[in-house]
Image (spheres, rainbow, N blue to C red):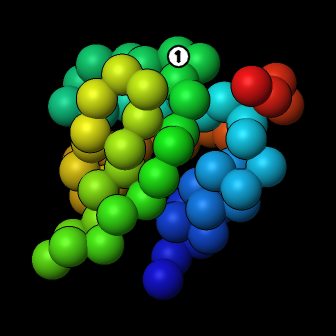
Amino acid sequence: MNIELRFLQKAIKDKNYISFTYKNKKYIKIRPLKLITKNTYVLKTSVKDFNFELITRIQILKEKF
């Protein structure tokens, strides 16, 4: 398990917003809801589901929801 995955799990637990880049599109202030393990990790958010392998530049924001 890599460090980004651990930070993401902590953000879900603490209910922090996140920002990241997915397929060269930037998502800002997204609510992470769940991290699902299938063959790969899938991040379920308030917007849509994202494949974790395609997410880059994850930032955990201080703001909570």
Asked whether residue 37 is in view, the answer is yes
Front residue (pair 36, 41): 36
Q: Is residue 29 left or right of residue 1?
A: right
Label 1 secondary element: strand
Percent position of residue 28, x then y: 52, 16
Q: What residue is drawn where x is 71% and y is 56%?
A: 13
Q: Amino acid at mark 1?
A: Ile
Query: Does residue 8 appear to the left or right of 57 in the view shown?
Result: right
Which residue corresponds to the image point at 53% horizontal and 24% vertical from the top-left?
30
Q: Quadrant of the C terminus?
A: top right
Residue 45, image x and y in percent?
42, 35
Q: Is residue 61 visible?
A: no
Q: Is residue 23 above or below residue 34?
A: above
Residue 6 or 45: which is nearer the viewer?
45
The local crowd at label 1, few if under 14, some if 14 to 19, many if 20 or more residues have their Cα within 10 Å, is: few
State the count of labels.
1
Q: Quadrant of residue 18?
A: top right
Q: Is residue 3 above or below residue 8?
A: below
The answer to which quarter of the image holds residue 10 is bottom right
What's the residue at 20%, 73% (across, down)? Answer: 38
State the residue position of label 1. 28
| Quarter residue 63 falls in | top right
| Residue reaching furthest to the bottom | 1
**Residue extending furthest toward the left:** 39
Work out whether 32 lies above or below 24. Answer: below
